[in-house]
C-alpha cells in the first residue's frame, strides 16, 4: 500500500476528531436550538441522543475507516466489493463537499466579526441587526471572508495528515478549550447569571414534545459529525492501537462539554440584557451577543473588547477544525482515486468550494431572489439537502452497513484491536443492539419528520 500517512499519536487522534465534532454546531447552533426548544429539557434529550445514537454510530464509522485505511469511497468498495454500498461512500464525500461550501459562509461571518471585534466595531456599533444585515447582503464582502476561511483550511490540508491536520488540531483545540474556560468565568460575572443558569439547568418537561426530541437527535448528529465521510476519513489515518470506544467516548465528552459551556457563556450574558430574548434564533451570536458585548464595554471597556474578541476567535477556531474534517475526505478521495498530488487535489476542493460557496454567500444579498424547492435560497437549499436529507440517510445506511452487512467478527476485531482489548459482554450486546435496531429506527423517525415538517 502506498504511504498515505497516519496520525502520530493517540492525543492527535482525539484532538483531530474532537476538532471535527466541535464547531459552529456547538457554539452557534446548539445555543440557538436550546433557546428555541425551551432550555434544559432539550439539553437532556440531546445528551441521551449523544449517548444512545451518536457514540455507537461514531464507533461504526471509525470501524469502516480504520479497517480499510482508505478514503470513504474506497473503504466501502473494499468492504463490500461489487455492491451498491460504494454509493454510501460517495454520498459521504459529496455531502462533505456540500456542507463545506455553506459552512464556510457562516465561518466567514465569524472571521468578519473577529476582525470587527479587534478594531472595536462590535462593541461600538449602534445597531447590531442593521450591521449584520448590511454585511450579509453586501455583494462581495461575504464572498471574500468565505474564501479567506477556505484558504486557511487549504493551508492546513495541503500539509497532510500529521504535518497539517494533527499539528494544527493540537494547537487550535487547547486554545479553544482555554478560551471557553475564560469566557465561562467572565460570563458568570454578568448580572443575568442566575436566570441564565436556571434556563439551562432546570428542565421544564412540559416543553418536551416530538419536535424537541427530533431536534435533539438532529443536533446530536450534526454536532458529532456522524453519518457521512468525515469521521470515516479521519479513522482511516488511525493507528492500529487506537481505541475506538475510548476515542468516540472522549470526543463525545469534549463535544458535549463545549456545547454546554457555550450555553453557559451565552445565556447568562443574554439574560443580563433584559430586552433580548433567548430564543432569538440563528442571529443569537451575530445580533444578540454584540449588544451584550456593548453593555460590558460600557461598564469596563477593556473587558467588553476582550470578551468580544475571544468569543469570535473561539467561533472561528471551532469552525476551522471542522472545515478541515470536511475538506479531507473530498481531498483524499480525489488524491487516491484519480492519483492526483495532494496539492492538486486540495486546490480542486478549495476552488470548487469557493465557487459553490459564492452562491451560498450571495444568497442573502444579490441572489436572494433565486429560489429552489419550497422557495429555498441556495444557502437554505444546501443546508436542507445536506443536514436534513443526506446526513440522516447516511446515518441509517451506516447503521445497517455496520450492524447487519459487515461480519460480526470484523466489527469485534476492530473494537477490540484484534482481541487485545477486553470489554464486558454487555458492552458488545449493547453496541449491537443500538447500531442494529435503535439507530436505524430512531433516525428514520427524524428523517420522516423532517421531510413532513
Ligand atoms: N460537527 C460540526 C459542528 O458541530 O459544527 C459540523 C460538521 C462537521 C458536520 C463535519 C458534519 C461533518 F461531517
Image (cartoon, rainbow, N blue to C red):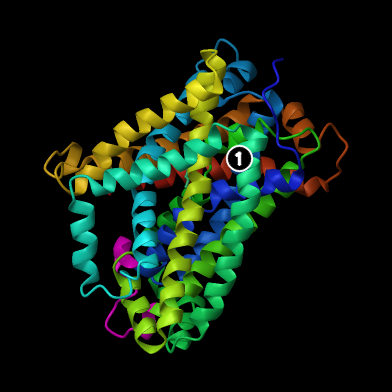
> Which residue shows up at 40% across the image and 74% down it?
206
In which quadrant will I find the N terminus?
Answer: top right
Residue 212, compared with residue 85, is above or below; it is below
- Please state if 422 lies on the left or on the right of 349 as rendered: right
* Residue 62 vs residue 16, the one in the foreground: 16
Disc count in the image? Answer: 1
Q: Please provide percent x and percent y for residue 402.
A: 62, 31
The image quarter containing residue 132 is bottom left
Q: What are the residue bounds of the magenta stretch? A: 270-284
* Neighbour tally class for label 1: few under 14, some 14-19, many 20 plus, Cα within 10 Å: many
> Which residue shows up at 50% across the image and 54% down it?
318
Q: Please provide percent x and percent y for residue 8.
A: 75, 38
Secondary element at image label 1: helix
> Which residue shows up at 42% across the image and 46% down it?
445
Q: Does residue 37 appear in the picture of this structure? A: no
Residue 408, compared with residue 428, is above or below; it is above
Q: Please provide percent x and percent y for residue 18.
A: 61, 50
Residue 272 lies within the magenta run: yes
Residue 286, compared with residue 415, is above or below; it is below
- Please state if 101 lies on the left or on the right of 15 as rendered: left
User: Residue most toward the left?
Assistant: 369
Q: Does residue 77 appear in the picture of this structure? A: yes
Residue under circle 1? Answer: 165
Residue 326 lies within the magenta run: no
* Residue 405 vs residue 309, the one in the foreground: 309
Q: Please provide percent x and percent y for residue 157.
A: 54, 34
User: Residue most toward the top?
Assistant: 82
* Residue 213 vs residue 322, the one in the foreground: 322
> Which residue shows up at 53% across the image and 30% down it?
329
Amino acid at each position: 500500500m502506498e504511504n498515505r500517512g497516519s496520525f502520530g499519536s493517540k492525543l492527535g487522534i482525539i484532538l483531530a476528531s474532537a476538532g471535527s465534532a466541535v464547531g459552529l454546531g456547538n457554539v452557534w447552533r446548539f445555543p440557538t436550538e436550546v433557546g428555541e426548544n425551551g432550555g434544559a429539557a432539550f439539553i437532556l434529550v440531546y445528551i441521551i441522543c449523544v449517548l444512545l445514537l451518536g457514540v455507537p454510530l461514531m464507533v461504526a464509522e471509525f470501524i469502516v475507516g480504520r479497517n480499510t485505511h482508505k478514503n470513504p469511497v474506497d473503504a466501502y468498495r473494499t468492504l463490500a466489493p461489487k455492491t451498491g454500498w460504494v454509493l454510501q461512500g460517495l454520498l459521504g464525500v459529496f455531502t462533505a463537499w456540500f456542507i463545506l461550501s455553506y459552512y464556510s459562509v457562516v465561518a466567514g461571518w465569524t472571521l468578519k466579526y473577529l476582525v470587527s471585534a479587534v478594531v472595536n466595531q462590535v462593541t461600538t456599533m449602534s445597531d447590531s441587526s442593521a450591521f449584520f444585515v448590511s454585511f450579509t447582503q453586501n455583494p462581495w464582502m461575504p464572498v471574500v471572508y468565505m474564501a479567506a476561511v477556505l484558504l486557511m483550511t487549504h493551508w492546513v490540508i495541503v500539509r497532510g495528515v500529521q504535518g497539517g491536520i494533527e499539528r494544527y488540531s493540537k494547537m487550535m483545540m487547547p486554545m479553544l478549550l482555554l478560551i471557553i474556560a475564560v469566557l465561562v468565568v467572565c460570563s458568570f460575572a454578568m448580572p443575568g447569571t442566575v436566570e441564565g443558569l436556571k434556563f439551562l439547568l432546570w428542565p421544564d418537561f412540559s416543553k418536551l414534545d416530538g419536535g424537541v426530541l427530533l431536534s435533539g437527535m438532529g443536533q446530536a448528529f450534526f454536532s458529532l459529525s456522524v453519518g457521512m465521510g468525515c469521521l470515516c476519513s479521519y479513522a482511516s489515518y488511525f493507528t492500529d492501537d487506537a481505541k475506538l470506544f475510548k476515542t468516540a467516548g472522549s470526543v463525545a465528552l469534549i463535544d458535549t462539554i463545549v456545547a454546554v459551556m457555550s450555553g453557559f457563556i451565552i445565556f447568562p450574558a443574554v439574560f443580563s440584557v433584559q430586552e433580548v430574548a433567548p430564543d432569538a434564533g440563528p442571529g443569537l451570536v451575530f445580533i444578540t451577543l454584540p449588544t451584550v458585548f456593548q453593555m460590558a464595554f460600557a461598564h469596563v471597556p477593556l473587558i467588553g473588547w476582550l470578551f468580544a474578541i475571544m468569543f469570535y476567535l473561539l467561533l472561528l477556531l471551532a469552525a476551522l477544525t471542522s472545515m478541515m474534517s470536511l475538506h479531507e475526505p473530498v481531498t483524499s478521495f480525489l488524491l487516491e482515486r484519480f492519483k492526483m498530488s495532494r496539492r492538486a487535489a486540495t486546490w480542486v476542493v478549495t476552488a470548487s468550494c469557493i465557487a459553490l460557496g459564492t452562491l451560498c454567500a450571495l444568497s442573502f444579498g444579490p441572489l436572494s431572489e433565486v429560489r429552489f424547492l419550497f422557495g429555498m435560497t441556495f444557502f437554505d437549499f444546501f443546508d436542507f439537502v445536506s443536514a436534513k436529507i443526506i446526513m440522516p440517510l447516511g446515518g441509517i445506511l451506516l447503521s445497517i452497513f455496520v450492524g447487519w452487512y459487515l461480519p460480526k467478527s470484523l466489527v469485534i476485531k476492530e473494537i477490540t484491536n484484534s482481541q487485545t482489548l477486553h470489554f464486558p459482554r454487555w458492552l458488545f450486546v449493547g453496541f449491537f443492539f443500538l447500531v442494529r435496531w435503535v439507530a436505524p429506527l430512531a433516525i428514520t423517525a427524524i428523517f420522516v419528520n423532517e421531510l413532513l415538517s
